Image: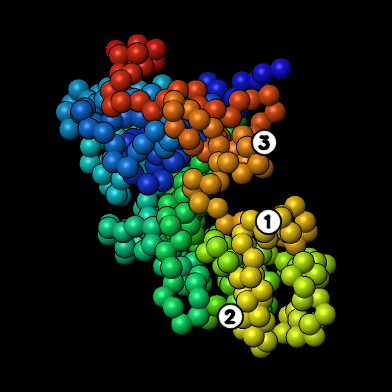
Amino acid sequence: MAQDRPLKGVRILEFAGIGPGPFCGMILSDLGADVVRIDRPGVKPQGVGKVTGRGRRSVALDLKSDTGIATALNLIEKADALFEGFRPGVMERIGLGPDETLVRNPALVYARMTGWGQNGPLSHAAGHDINYIALSGALGSMGRKDEPPPPPLNLVGDYGGGAMFLIVGLLAGLLRARETGKGQVIDAAMTDGSALLMALFHDLKNYGVWRDERGANLLDGAAPFYDTYECADGKFVSIGAIEPQFYALLLEKTGLAADPDFSMQMDQKRWPELKHKLAAIIRKKTRDEWVEIMEGTDVCFAPVLSLSEAPTHPHNVTRNTFIDFEGTIQPAAAPRFRGVPNTPERRAPEPGEHTEEVLAEWDCK
């Protein structure tokens, strides 16, 4: 039996921004919230497309005008939560800061997303994902020895350390507000979030089994059994055979089980030599040949797929991990809920497309 999406009936205002803001709005709308994006009249939000813009409605307001601010405050009175990603002080300057809005709506959950946080010596400086994860220690822990740290797309700061923590805070605030009737102000900083994502590695460092040196540790590509390898066709495979039984199976599948050099799995001094030998073996076959040999076994293996290839992999096809929505191939909603569809409820809106509809429905005219 089909069920309602978990956040059905929750009203959330999204003040249009870039990076983690649209991603946050997409996930909250995937979960069923009525997310209304506040756009500038006639201006398309930067970097928001058919995927990251899906699921919500758009109201166009001129927040430099008294009328626009008054309408925004009316919407805020009817909202359960809002989130914004401007530099500290911007919302206060236009009269929509937490102090003004919580007076109008004491149960409001007010979520703020920034790179550096709402305070601190860098709080007003410009920055991007790569800068925030550099400061938190995350970026400096990634990459090969004797090479600059590679930018891990903008997944660690914007999305992992930013949007996902903003969502966690916002949802926790909503639960508390429903119990107490009191709202909350959430300061989600990408520096804080990406620092917290490194919790395991602080543990490992405290135990003396993780070094600050890149490319010298278990999970950073130094270990021959935890890395990516190039195949005969120039494509790549990933291997993560950490546990002894998985490592033994890797040696069996690659024909290295009888090689005494591989008998001491955790001898880090030998890792460079073993990696060189394993790489030579992997290069003898194509990616598809290794898929035939290893995929679905306990080697801990997967082919390295491109954005174009991933939607066609049988596992992803079976789980509907990717969907064709409004003619665009895109990732489906995650996580899954029993009986709940994982497809968007509506396409990405044009700026101001739903202004009259939302104002009437929320009784804000």
Q: Residues within 10 Å of mark 2 (few under 14, many from 20)?
A: many
Residue 218, can we see it? Answer: no
Give the foreground label among 1 and 2: 1
Q: Give the quadrant of residue 101.
A: top left
In this rendered view, identify the residue nearer to me: 336 or 257.
Answer: 257
Q: Amino acid at mark 2?
A: Ala
Image coordinates for residue 174, horizontal then vertical, percent: 54, 33
Q: Which residue is mark 2?
A: 216
**Circle 3/circle 1 CB separation < 8 Å:** no
Q: Is residue 285 visible?
A: yes
- Of label 1 and label 2, which has the lower sequence position? 2
- Locate residue 97, reporting x and y percent: 32, 39
Which of the marked residues, 3 or 2, is nearer the chain's N terminus?
A: 2
Say which of marks 3 and 1 sits in front. Answer: 1
Which residue is denoted by mark 3 in the rendering?
318
Q: As shown in the figure, which amino acid type bears the numbered disc 3?
A: Thr
Residue type at mark 1: give it.
Answer: Val
Label 1 element class: helix
Q: Is residue 233 left or right of residue 50?
A: right
